[in-house]
Amino acid sequence: MTKRLSYAVRRLDQCHNIADFRELAKRRLPFPVFHYIDGAADDEATKDRNTAAFEEVDLVPRVLAGVADIDMSVTVLGRTTPLPLMLSPTALQRLFHWQGERAVAAVAEKFGLWFGVSSLSSVSIEEVGANYAGPKMLQYYYHKDRGLNAALVERARAANFDAITLTVDTIVSGNRERCKRTGFTTPPKFTPASFLSYATHPAWALNFLFREKFDLPNLSTHVQAGSGKAISIQDYFNEMLDPSMDWQAAEDLRNQWGGKFCLKGIMSVEDARRAADMGVDAIMVSNHGGRQLDGSRAPFDQLDEIVQAVGDRIEVILDGGVRRGSHVLKALATGAKAVSGGRLYLYALAAAGQPGVDRAVGLLAAEIERGMKLMGVNRVDQLTPTCLRSRR
């Protein structure tokens, strides 16, 4: 992991990278909520590896390239965006800041980025579709409740979403020990162990208690967990999601949707080939931020062989571990069509709401542009494997 100087971050203007937003979020959130964002499965080795993997290769810059004009745009899932960056779908965002998905959607619209809306979002599919322009995907969890599954597709279609992304790595929940230790549920339960942390973060507590009631509106018409019943995410996945989901179920969903379709959570070459054979438009190489199978490979570790196997047939998106613009450049040079991340904006959301997300995305955009200039490239497609050297 990249070393960084240790210093106190107490204000938004002191945040100059994603690690700074993490520190500010830790200060501003009750500890059960912070550790839900920050935590992962078991020993969290895979979560740490997701970022550390980028250090295994070095960028090799060219010079005297004439880089006054830089084009950072890419076309992903049929939509051209100004940056090769996507904001991954993440659940429960109004727990982290009262603005929640509204803040993230507004920033995505400003920068023209893909915005992923979770099935477990705290703002409805309809509201996001009606109020925010720009490309939007529904991150789809495959539930045991077939009525809920069908309703999610129809709601995304009616709201003019651009794509559905089926998450394929959550047939059961990972072992999230931090959440077990803190007793985190959604919505939060105030326990003797956690009460002091909530009480010493009054801004968060007052917003949670006195603004609009927390809900999971995409679920509330079908399952009790969407209507205010406290439940852990682990219990939700284990009780509500269907472990019998298979390739036929994925193909049936793609056919039912009929639009741009992506699989999120592909980590093996064999599965990537099968996805391409099925005719999906894109795959996200992802291990769910290290929150599922600890000890699994990092997405960047797997990216090259997956691109070599299917990159000429489907779009390959790297998801996970991204904290710097240089990470984006390395993924693109390896062959990713774009790069996606969740914690990179969740820390900023928790730290300062919409201004925080805006600053975080702006800093990453500046890092990508500066990095391209220092690499001597004018366009994203000029980032190729010749720009990289492995340290091994």
Image: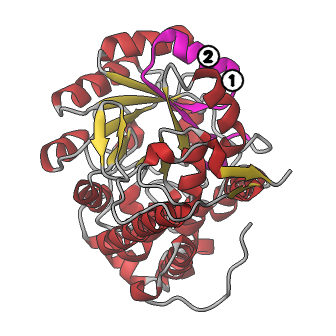
> Of 354 and 292, which appears nearest the observer?
354
Whether residue 243 is visible, yes or no, is no
Q: Alpha-carbon neighbours of circle 2 within 10 Å: few (<14), some, or many (≥20)?
A: some
The residue under label 2 is: 273
Whether residue 50 is visible, yes or no, is yes
| Residue at left offset 26%, top offset 72% | 210
**In the rendering, at what x and y percent does residue 128 appear?**
22, 46
Quick check: 246 left or right of 120?
Answer: right
Residue furthest toward the right? Answer: 392
Above or below: residue 148 compared with residue 38: above
| Residue at left offset 60%, top offset 63% | 38
Q: Tag 2's secondary structure?
A: helix
| Residue at left offset 45%, top offset 65% | 364
Q: Verify CB contact (< 8 Å) between mark 2 and mark 1.
A: yes
**In the rendering, at what x and y percent does residue 356 appear?**
37, 73
**In the rendering, at what x and y percent does residue 178 appear?**
68, 60
> Of 257 and 57, which appears nearest the observer?
57
Asked whether residue 24 is drawn in magenta, I would say no
The residue under label 1 is: 269
Above or below: residue 330 compared with residue 19: above
Above or below: residue 312 compared with residue 161: above
The number of discs equals 2
Quick check: 294 left or right of 285?
Answer: right
Q: Alpha-carbon neighbours of circle 1 within 10 Å: few (<14), some, or many (≥20)?
A: some
**In the rendering, at what x and y percent does residue 106 appear?**
24, 59
Q: Amino acid at mark 2?
A: Arg
Q: Which residues are magenta?
A: 264-293
| Residue at left offset 30%, top offset 46% | 81
Whole-Å distance between the Cαs marked 2 and 1? 6 Å
